[in-house]
Structure formats: structure tokens, C-alpha cells
Image (cartoon, helix red, strand yellow):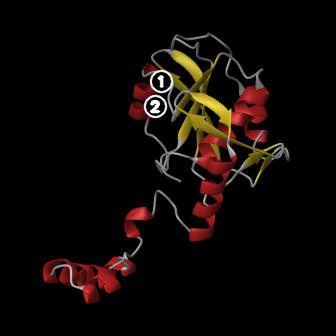
Amino acid sequence: MTLYADQELAALLQDQESQLVERKRSGADRSGIRKNICAFANDLPGTGKPGVIFVGVENDGGCAGIQVDDELLRTLAQIRSDGNILPLPSMTVEKKTIHECDVAAIQVEPAANPPVRYQGRVWVKVGPTVQQATPEEEQRLTERRRSGYSASRAWRKPRTAWVWLWPLMNRAIKAGSSSGNNRLLGLAT
């Protein structure tokens, strides 16, 4: 799992809520936290970056002044395996002190096998909001799983189709629009 360094977390905390950042005043809104964990694990935009939920932070980025103790960290960590989010997300829960403010930082890695569901529903981040996925978005996530696509590994995937297809297309384009080349490209004559 690729986690953010403390400096990166500080920068994310100071930025506005986005497809990678969510702020919660306290750990009381467990349903909202679960929806965000699910949405970050689904990584609909395909960023390949972890999403972060800062617990103990006001919506404007100010410190909420809550006590971040072992009980809160255990409660947040147990959200992962309480049976409400399946498949289990890859995540960490840590106490961080950022700009003299104690927060619980939950970092959620994009899932290798989306879609991830909270109580049977697929949730995604759309900008700074969390929304239930449309059937089309759910289909995109399912196709991503079937293809073995991972945004964090996409740059390593071989582009085998283009390796042999590009020279054929290039020759056809250079040769002009003869009927044989049109058939090669699948164009009507």
C-alpha cells in the first residue's frame, strides 16, 4: 500500500474536499465514514491514489478539537471488518498531529477487485460528494475488475494490440483509400 507522507497529508488537509479527501468532525457518523471508505476503494476516476478521511476536522479544514485516543482508532479500524463493506478494503487508521491538531487519518487504497459495496450498495466519489453509483458506473467498475485493470499498475500493462495493429493501420492510411485498404480498416466502400 502506498501511503501519503506526513507533508502530503498536511497539504491534503489544507486543500478542499475532493475525490481524494473527506473531512469528518467526529467518528459519530459511521455510516458516512463507511460510504466514503467504499467510495475511495472503488476509485471511480481511476486515480490509483489512496483516499483520505480526516476525522477530527471541520468542513472548512479547522480543527474540531476532539480526543483522538485508542478507543476512537480501534472503532474506526473495526469498520473495515464489521461485515458492512465487502470485499474488505485495504486501509490504515492512524493518529496524526497536523498543524497542532490531532486527527485520525484513514487512508483507503483503491481496490484490486471493484466494485466494493457498503450494505450491498456501490458508493463512489463524484468530486467532493459521495453518491450511490449509477448502473453505468457500477458496470465500469465491474469491467475494470474483469479486465484486471488497476490504475496504480496501468503503466505496466503491455499494449500488445497496438504493437501489431498500428503498422497495419499506418500502411493503410499511407496507401490511400483503395477498396482493399478500406476493407482492412472495416470501412464501407
Q: Which mark is residue 13?
A: 1
Q: Which mark is residue 89?
A: none
* Residue 34 x/y as whole percent: 74, 35
Give the tally of numbered discs: 2
Would residue 100 be found to the left or right of residue 90 on screen?
Answer: left
Would residue 167 be found to the left or right of residue 140 on screen?
Answer: left
Q: 170 above or below 6?
A: below
* Residue 2 x/y as whole percent: 48, 51
> What's the amino acid at mark 2?
Leu
Q: 111 above or below 186?
A: above
Say which residue appears at 65% left-offset and 15% top-offset: 25
Cα–Cα gap, marks 1 and 2:
6 Å
Would residue 5 be found to the left or right of residue 168 on screen?
Answer: right
Mark 1 touching mark 2, by CB under 8 A? yes
Say which residue appears at 15% left-offset and 83% top-offset: 175
Mark 2 residue element: helix
Which residue is nearer to you in this view: 133 or 16? 133
Which residue is nearer to you in this view: 9 or 40? 40
Classify residue 70 by image quadrant. top right
Residue bearing mark 2? 9
Residue farthest to the front, as pictured: 189
Which residue is nearer to you in this view: 32 or 144? 144
Which residue is nearer to you in this view: 40 or 172? 172
Label 2, residues with CA under 10 Å away: few <14, some 14-19, many ≥20: some
* Residue 160 x/y as whole percent: 38, 81
Say which residue appears at 79% left-offset and 40% top-offset: 78
* Residue 141 x/y as whole percent: 62, 55
Classify residue 35 by image quadrant. top right
Regarding residue 13, the answer to whether it shows in the image is yes
Q: Quadrant of the C terminus?
A: bottom left
Would residue 93 be found to the left or right of residue 82 on screen?
Answer: left
